[in-house]
């Protein structure tokens, strides 16, 4: 294993803390499927069974989640390093919750589920990394569940975006009709339109026909944090 | 190790599938702190650091979660077998999200975090059980995050209860002022009162002064499922 490869793996949170010997051993035993994929290709389809971990090591990916009622599409953009839905590999709902498409030429590799516990599970650091990542997901999701009540329409709107965000930073895109968004937020079309335009005037959103772009989710979250003391 | 003990451990989802030899080995190496606790004692305090797994093997427990704004208290009731917040042991938010009190004389045991990975992590079945449990939590929480939009006040109310439920069945209790509940649900006090009384008339809730009892969360969830096709 060359130095670049070692370095690349260590960038990934799941492998952080492993020593070069461990990694050499792992690469010797575990089949890592490397692939180069052109821009604009779908590499994972929403609803497919998650039976491997797919890692992005170079380039960009976009996730695309369609809601169950067919009202909207949520896109999220990721750069390397990234692993797709490590929380969908075990448990009872092991279908991918979104599709994933390359946004540039990309380098990826994947590891089949069969190798994860029998081989990688031998390394306590890997176990710890995995448990930390999944536990953290559960904690973040739970925290959001308990913090989304009431608030102004603007705050509920940002909460809606945040609930859909795998990462609370970076670019996101919501494709939705204004009337459906109003329905989802339990408010009027006029109020929703007004709140969106207000956020656009603060350069936190960019509105297009049937599309809401969030250039930087972190800025929106920071804005919301500043609003919170005004609550009940 | 006697047969009863073996049987007791195997009831716990974290130990399911281990063979008697494994369990004998584990009990030999890992310190299990057994304790008998009288009814009405607090065994875990909300906000304390989760540095062990606490298992209920006989009796009853009640969780008590106070929200961040001091508006309400959420109680949930558990019988054996139960483990308190296995998702709070790893990750970045490792404080207990609730207090836990015995509701009857109870048999408990706990395992310190230090033993979990170095000793229990040696057993692939234990690793798999733990990853399944935590992944499942993340999946359930995420699913709830994405399914709580819009709907009638009645549905939003049931969603609020569900978001707070560790288990979607059994008895729950929400201590809250009607006006605060109305604020949290972004609706009027009158509408909330009406919706609560409607659910009480269906025997899904019991209303008392500043208290809402849910005798059986599963019945309330089943009722909500029947409502869902009416949505947009």
Image: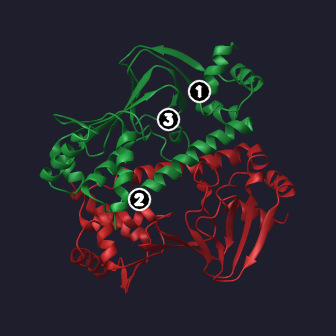
Chain colours: A green, B red
Give how far across and how far down residue A107 sits, in percent: 50, 17
Give me the disc on residue A111: 1
Report whether A178 appears left or right of B10: left
- Chain of the residue under the numbered disc 3 shown in the image: A
| N-term mark: 1 or 3 | 3
**Label 2 SS:** loop
- Front residue of this view, candidates A123 and A44: A123
- The image shows residue B74, relative to residue B142, as above or below, that is below
To which residue does mark 2 refer? A147
Position of residue A64 relative to residue A21, above or below, is below
Q: Position of residue A125 (x, y in %)?
A: 71, 37
The structure residue drawn at horizontal position 33% and vertical position 73%, both measured from the top left corner, is B181
| Cα distance in 3D space between marks 2 and 1 | 36 Å
Residue A108 point in image, percent of width and height: 51, 20
Q: Is residue A65 above or below residue A6?
A: below
B92 is higher (above) or lower (below) than A166: below
Local packing at callout 3 (Cα closer than 10 Å; few below 14, some 14-19, many 20+) is many
Q: Earlier in the sequence, mark 2 or mark 3?
A: 3
Identity of the residue furthest to the bottom in this view: B209
What residue sits 68% from the left and 82% below the top? B105
Q: Chain of mark 2?
A: A
Pick the quarter of the image with the N terminus of chain B.
Answer: bottom right
Point out the tag, 2 or 1, that comes first from the N-terminus.
1
Could you give the CA–CA distance between mark 2 and mark 3, rounded to whole angstroms?
29 Å
The residue labelled by disc 3 is A50
Question: Do residues under tags 2 and 1 come within 8 Å of each other at their CB atoms?
Answer: no
Q: Chain of mark 1?
A: A
Q: Which residue is drawn at the image coordinates 30% and 60% (left, top)?
A: A151
> Are the residues flagged by discs 1 and 3 in contact, CB closer than 8 Å?
no
């Amino acid at each position: 294993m060359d130095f670049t490869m070692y370095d690349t793996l260590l960038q990934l949170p799941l492998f952080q803390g492993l020593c070069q010997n461990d990694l050499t051993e792992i690469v010797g035993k575990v089949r890592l499927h490397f692939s180069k994929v052109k821009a604009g290709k779908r590499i994972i389809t929403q609803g497919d069974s998650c039976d491997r971990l797919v890692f992005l090591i170079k380039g960009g990916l976009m996730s695309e989640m369609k809601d169950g009622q067919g009202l909207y599409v949520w896109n999220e953009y990721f750069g390397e390093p990234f692993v797709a839905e490590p929380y969908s590999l075990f448990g009872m709902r092991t279908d991918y919750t979104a599709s994933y498409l390359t946004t540039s030429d990309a380098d990826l590799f994947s590891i089949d589920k069969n190798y994860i516990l029998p081989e990688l599970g031998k390394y306590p650091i890997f176990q710890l990394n995995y448990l930390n990542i999944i536990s953290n997901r559960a904690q973040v999701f739970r925290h959001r569940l308990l913090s989304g009540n009431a608030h102004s329409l603007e705050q509920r709107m940002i909460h809606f975006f945040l609930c859909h965000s795998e990462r609370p930073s970076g670019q996101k895109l919501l494709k939705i009709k204004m009337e459906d968004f109003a329905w989802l937020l339990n408010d009027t079309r006029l109020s929703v339109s007004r709140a969106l335009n207000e956020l656009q005037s603060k350069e936190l959103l960019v509105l297009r026909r049937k599309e809401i772009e969030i250039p930087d989710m972190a800025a929106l979250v920071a804005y919301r944090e500043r609003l919170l003391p005004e609550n009940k």
